[in-house]
Amino acid sequence: MKSERVDPFEGLLKFVATLSLENPYPDWQITDKLEGITIDSSLPKDTMLHETGIKREAIEGIWIIVEQYPDETGAKEGHLKWTELMRDYPDYPLKDIDSWSLEEK
């Protein structure tokens, strides 16, 4: 699935709105932890798009959103793919999908 762009201002407003919710956490989430690597797939409330993020403490130290999916089934398949990739190649180069269009000029 080609990543969908979210207007940065709209995304920020949705993110701030989640802070005021009784339950700001995603409605759906899978998390796997390897040695120093966290792979998390969820349906976050700021974008409302299924996505996988990876945080490698020893390399980037920040969350990188690597893929978005049309539905939960795609997210589960993608999560498994990324978990296996990180297990086999923990220093594989990651590219953020830039869903908030922050890199656009």
Image: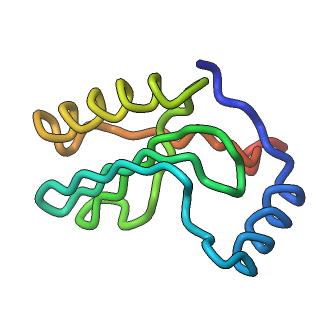
Residue 34's spot in the image, x, y percent? 14, 54
Q: In the drawing, does residue 50 fall left or right of residue 87?
A: right
Point 69% across, 45% down: residue: 48
Furthest residue to the top? Answer: 1
Quarter containing the C terminus: top right
Residue 29's spot in the image, x, y percent? 43, 51
Residue 46's spot in the image, x, y percent? 71, 57
Coloring scheme used: rainbow
Residue 70's quadrant in the figure? top right
Identify whether 78 is placed above or below 22: above
The front one of 62 and 48 is 48
Quarter containing the N terminus: top right
Q: How many numbered marks, from 0 up?
A: 0
Point 56% across, 32% down: residue: 68
Residue 80's quadrant in the figure? top left
Residue 17's quadrant in the figure? bottom right
Residue 22's spot in the image, x, y percent? 66, 78
